[in-house]
Amino acid sequence: MTEKELVLLFADGDAGARELLGGKGANLAEMTRIGLPVPPGLTITTIACRRFYEEGRRLPEGLAEQLAEKLSVVEKQTGKSFGDAQNPLLVSVRSGAAVSMPGMMDTILNLGLNDETVQGLAANANDERFALDCFRRFIQMFGNVVLKIPHARFEELLAQKRVAVGAQYDYEIKSATLAELIEDYKKLVLQETGVSFPQDPHEQLLMAVHAVLASWQNERAIVYRRIHHIPDDLGTAVNVQAMVFGNLGADCGTGVLFTRNPNTGEAVLYGEYLINAQGEDVVAGIRTPKPIAQLAMEMPDVWAELQAACRLLESHYKEMQDIEFTVEKGRLYILQTRSGKRTAQAAVRIAIEMVDEGLIDRREALRRVDPEQLVQLLHRQVDPQTDSDVVAVGLPASPGAASGQVAFSADEAERLGEAGEKVILVRPETTPDDIHGIVQAQGVLTSRGGMTCHAAIVARGMGKPAVVGCEALEIDLVNGTLRVGERLYRQGDLISIDGTTGRVFDGLVETIEPKLGAEFARLLSWADEEARLEVYANADTPADAEAARRFGAVGIGLCRTEHMFMAQDRLPVVQDMILAANEEERQAALDKLLPMQQGDFEGILRAMAGYPVIIRLLDPPLHEFLPDEMELHKSVWELEKAGDRTALAEKQALLTKVQRMQEANPMMGHRGCRVGIISPEIYEMQARAIFQAVAKLVGEEGLTIKPEVMIPLVGHYRELEATRQVVVRAAKDVQAQTGVKFSYKVGTMIEVPRAALTADEIATYAEFFSFGTNDLTQMTFGFSRDDAEGKFLTHYLMNKILPANPFAELDRNGVGKLMQMALELGRATRPDLSIGICGEHGGDPSSIQFCHEIGLDYVSCSPFRVPVARLAAAQVAISSPR
């Protein structure tokens, strides 16, 4: 084919021409090629679409002539003539992009009807009402899609006729009334456009083609492409196909079916059909469709032919198919086939069973399942049949469904949760102070924050549903109210959230349990055989570690020790340590914290016995553990009012200390290794707690323990050199005191651009690198994550300033280059340097692909994304072998 050929007959294409013919056109061509009964037709290629836009939304030169030439072949194939009054050929005009975009672009049916051809159609069908109804539908569809008259205007006229004749349904309207309605429709077209409805079928066709090409840039198609990362320059093909009719009598019908159950994956035909109906009637709800299996009794010959066609299509495509068919006068026609959409449960089962049936091999089975779909299997989900009211929509930060009472504070959520109540923690945003409330809550709902805000990260790590950045919420913490539009919720009122879609519901919703079967485990075992990247998990508690192992993690890539400090029984001790007036007071507080930390580490290390556990020493600024400044001001004001001088003096002193520790830019201030250098006793306590836990588990329980100590926020090798000495000294002391020998590693998180640029120097003191891509992305872009997502990042994405959210999908050209540089420099110094990633990107399939390509050893993600990462790692290993 040349660039000048803009139109191809179905007989001239095949499945391999998807980018040229679109998915629908390629499948119609392929079905024609393998001998299935497909109504003849032609496809206007995506080249024509691109030229249409290049030439200012004008039909390309030569398209009309080529269209007429190919249409004459379709006339010969059908024995009908386009525009002929006695034996008219009618066609459908449908879009069809290379990537499926269901419902996003436009379709026109019954094109070719006018005041004359409708009479010929009626005579040939021996059914005047059928012909008039087809004409009525055509004017309505053409008027809406091509002439841009609101669909509701036609529906109003139709409803008026139903009322006038006492008809409940459209199909009860008689021929005479339909003829009147057609005239009303024509008057509406003249009134709205100033011109009469076009009677020339050739003019109708060119206008329809223009409208379908233009629909590539309609608002819903643009939004769909943005959501699904579909390039804007692909363009759509246009399929012009001879109409067949399922509404000509009792020997006619229409239906939709899947070659396997799309909900469960069971290998049975699944679908519905109607006798004497058009395709739109099956989905319109006007009549109740029948289960597809009943077709065997009503049309046994057609049923046998349909079964054979399904077997042929599934065997040919080696994939579950979604098929549309029509029966006209006892003859079966296949109108469309495509890969069927399916649930995660069905996707896994179908992939496994197709391997067992010999249709595909294991590698193809792994390719067939979308890693992101696996998330559906791991969390409770809102029942798809729910009819609960959706009151707001935010960002789907952590998947799953949850219902419970509204709680506006972490303390209240904790109190209710410990009492056995189900709670949704509702906050403008969450902070580390809220961790105890999040632990007890069923889910988290915030009005601010982005996909990687605190609430999102913590909820994902715990496997709890979360909806964040829901700007429709008006949260009044003082009065304890939540307003959404006209609805007002108080503490204790019931709401539900769907962290998979971002929906917020009024009251309780029905949910369904996740189902993990043998097929799930089998698929992931195949994935592990293919993957070159190991998959670790981010886990801060023994429960997290156990979940990580349950989902197949082979290590802990990030254990955040600061989360352990936020427990209510130790936060006061942490505050004593921070606010200590002298070294003795601080050491006393550290001595109290050490056994608490040791107990934490024992639980996590025991759960991960035999596997590496990377423990990050304290990272956030110390002031984050202190009381809120505004709350202290409030307390001071109340004590002044009460005249309690003793308590007032203490509270004012505390306020002064808190104010002294505040920072203008905490993210880049006194945190991470800087705390460990200025206050080495903190890191010394943590390191000692780690190694005492190791010594106990190795010496007393005989376990194999593999601790790795990670120093955060290193930007200069001397920072790592100094803090490493503290860790090594603690290890030696513990080994000397206990007599237990153990191995360990010391490494650093690469999250400061300078660390990446000087990784060769840093590797001298590091046995492993772990990329903290959340902070590395912030520092590379100069973005504050929450501010960016809340204020301008959406605009950047909509206007294509950025191709994707860099906090959700790794920025390969910027952050990625720093990672690759750090890897190459680090391994030049230390060839056996272990390198992984522990930011949120560790669970993103696109980012995992990049990590595989540059040669990382592992990725680490939240426990509930471990299966996603395992499958993604296998898929990239198959497609891009190292």
Image: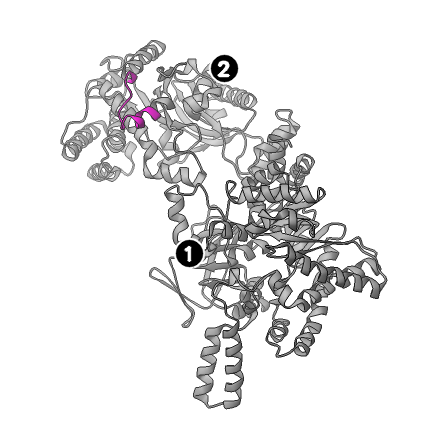
**Residue at (30, 25) in percent of width and height:** 52
**Front residue (pair 516, 55):** 55
Q: Is residue 54 magenta?
A: yes
**Front residue (pair 878, 143):** 878
Q: Contact, CB < 8 Å: mark 1 with mark 2? A: no
Neighbour tally class for label 1: few under 14, some 14-19, many 20 plus, Cα within 10 Å: many
**Front residue (pair 597, 578):** 578
Left or right: 799 with respect to 553? left
Neighbour tally class for label 2: few under 14, some 14-19, many 20 plus, Cα within 10 Å: few
Could you give the CA–CA distance between mark 1 and mark 2, rounded to whole angstroms? 51 Å
Q: Which residue is mark 1?
A: 470
Left or right: 790 with respect to 435? left
Q: Which residue is mark 2?
A: 34
Q: Is residue 141 above or below residue 787?
A: above
Q: Which amino acid type corresponds to the residue marked 2 in the rendered image?
A: Ile
Give residue 103's position: percent from left, percent from top: 38, 35
* Dot label at residue 80: none
Q: Is residue 591 above or below residue 388?
A: below
**Residue at (48, 77) in percent of width and height:** 632
Q: Residue 210: name its quadrant.
A: top left
Q: Determine the residue located farthest toward the right in the rendered image.
A: 739
Q: Which amino acid type corresponds to the residue marked 1 in the rendered image?
A: Cys
Give residue 85's position: percent from left, percent from top: 22, 14
- For the N terminus, which image quadrant? top left
- For the C terminus, which image quadrant? top right
